[in-house]
Amino acid sequence: MNNTRCAACKHLRRKCPSDCIFYPYFPSNNPQRFAYVHKIFGASNISKMLKQLPEHKRAEAADSLYMEAKFRVQDPVYGCVGVISSLQQQIQTTQSQLAETQAHMTFINAHQPNADQHQLQQQPCYPQTFSSLRSEEIRVEDTTHSFLNNNLLQESPQLPDNR
Ligand SMILES: [Zn+2]
């Protein structure tokens, strides 16, 4: 028997056995995490899914079940697919902006008289466009990164703790 019940056993109002499958992945200080997966998958299915996996893969599986459940609750139609498509959209937009700028630069370089080419390289106009594009790219990566941080790693105790 565990001294402190895990979030799952607390939620299900039962004793937490020492070999509780939920205990390592659903800590009592984050009841919301279990509430999401229970609502979407059901406790018994989560237990089955975790038991089917080798122990070293269970934490990752619990994280991914949590992510999927959380976004399914927040967006019942698209779930985490909604987030993925939105990020893919951002990547596509940025890639087409980059292609457009590169084509523009090629055009300008090809039509620039040789005498002015040195001056053009000195001018920050096009490199500036390019660097703003670079920061756009970085922004997409940052979004992905913070998306993971916010949703995978951060604890968000929004629902009241069911004791
Ligand atoms: Zn437990």
Image (cartoon, grey):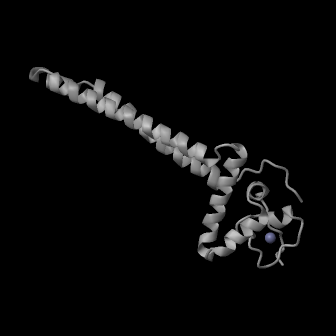
Percent position of residue 26, x then y: 74, 64
Residue 139 in sight: no
- Vertically, is 85 above or below 54? above
Percent position of residue 90, x then y: 48, 37
- Vertically, is 93 above or below 17? above
Q: Residue at x 55, y 46 (%)?
A: 84
Percent position of residue 12, x then y: 86, 64
Q: Residue at x 49, y 38 (%)?
A: 89
Q: Residue furthest left?
A: 115
Q: Residue at x 71, y 71 (%)?
A: 48
Looking at the rendered image, the quarter that the N terminus falls into is: bottom right
Residue 107 in sight: yes
Q: Quadrant of residue 121?
A: top left
Looking at the rendered image, the quarter that the C terminus falls into is: bottom right
Total numbered circles? 0
Q: Is residue 26 left or right of residue 113?
A: right
Q: Residue furthest front?
A: 77
Q: Is residue 25 left or right of residue 125?
A: right
Q: Nearer the viewer, residue 146 or 52?
A: 52
Q: Is residue 106 left or right of residue 39?
A: left
